[in-house]
Every structure is written in structure tokens, then in C-alpha cells.
Image (cartoon, rainbow, N blue to C red):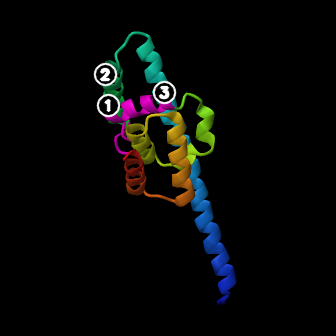
Amino acid sequence: MTIKNDKVLNELKTDIRESRLQAGIEVNKIMLQLYWRIGKTISELENDGHTKKQITSWLAKDLEKVYSTTISFSQRNLRYMQRFYVAYPDVEILQELLAQLPWGYHIVLLDLVGTYEERIYYARLVVEHGWSEERLIEVIKSDRN
């Protein structure tokens, strides 16, 4: 038996696309919360007298062995996680706006934008306009000129 109904098929395709998008946003939110907690841990260890270099070296050696195929836990990325925590000390901000941005966008914002308010401003623009990372960089740099 063959069922031919374009309306049903189009509705299913739309539902699949929207579900995949929602799943991606949820996964992204969970990963950002993980990165935030890792950054918090690094900050707490740093407050206990260890240097950031010691901490990230120690964590990178162990975590990269176990998780290198799924997530980068390089020293560089761990330092970004610590900066991410410092930049957004209230984890609640990750529930809404920032959860919509993949990690690469956060790295751009951490590297190019100095204040919390500016990072939130640019994050809103990215979500509103659907900018690529490259477009975000262009806009930030042009605003600086």
C-alpha cells in the first residue's frame, strides 16, 4: 500500500527538523554548563594556590587520554573554560541566551569583547540575525574602528 500525502510528509519533515534543532540546543546547553563547571573548578583550584598552568596541564594530561575523541580538553580549551566561568559567574545566564551559541562563538566573545554587557549584546545579535562566527568577528572589529 502506498500513501501519497505531501502535507503529511511535509509536516513530518518540519517536526523532524525542529526536534533535531531542539535536541542540538539542549546538548549545547548541557555542554556549556559542563564547561562552566570545569572553569569553576579550575578557578577554585587556582584560589587554593595552584597556578592555572599547573591545573590545566594536570587536567589536560588526564582528560585528553579519556575523552580526546569527543571533546577537546587541551590546556588551551581548559583555559577558555576558566575564562568562560569568570566571564559569566552566574550559571543561570546559560539557561537562555548563551545556551543558543556554540562554544566557538563564546571563544570569539571571550577573545574580542571586554565586558559582560558587550558580550550579551553581541550574543543577542548573533541569535537575532543567525550570524556565522566570521560575521560576528567582522561586526565586532568594525564596531571597534
> Can you say whether 88 is above or below 24 in the image?
above
Who comes first in sequence, dot 2 or dot 3?
2
Structural crowding at the residue carrying mark 1, measured as other residues with C-alpha within 10 Å and reported as few (<14), some (14–19) or many (≥20): many
Q: Quadrant of residue 18?
A: bottom right
Rendered residue at 47%/23% (across/down): 41
Question: Which three-letter amino acid code belongs to the residue tagged 3?
Answer: Val
Neighbour class for label 2 at 10 Å: few (<14), some, many (≥20)?
A: some
Count of marks overlaid on the render: 3
- Residue at 41% x, 16% y: name it: 46
Is the residue under label 3 in contact with that under label 2 (CB below 8 Å)?
no
Horizontal arrangement in the rendering, residue 15 relative to residue 115 (left or right): right
Q: Is residue 48 magenta?
A: no
Q: Is residue 80 magenta?
A: yes
* Residue designated by label 1: 75
The residue wearing badge 2 is: 53
| Kind of residue indicated by mark 1 | Gln
Q: Which residue has dot 3 on it?
A: 86
Do callouts 1 and 2 mark residues in contact (Cβ within 8 Å)? yes
Q: Secondary structure at mark 1?
A: helix
* Above or below 90: residue 5: below
Give 2 or 51, whichever is nearer the viewer.
51
The dominant secondary structure in magenta is helix
Residue 57 screen position, x and y as percent: 30, 24
Q: Amino acid at mark 2?
A: Lys
Label 1 to label 3, Cα distance in Å? 17 Å
Range covered by the magenta-colored residues: 67-87
Q: Earlier in the sequence, mark 1 or mark 3?
A: 1
Q: Look at the picture and state if 1 lies above or below 110.
A: below
- Label 1 and label 2: CA atoms lie apart by 8 Å
Q: Is residue 100 left or right of residue 39?
A: right
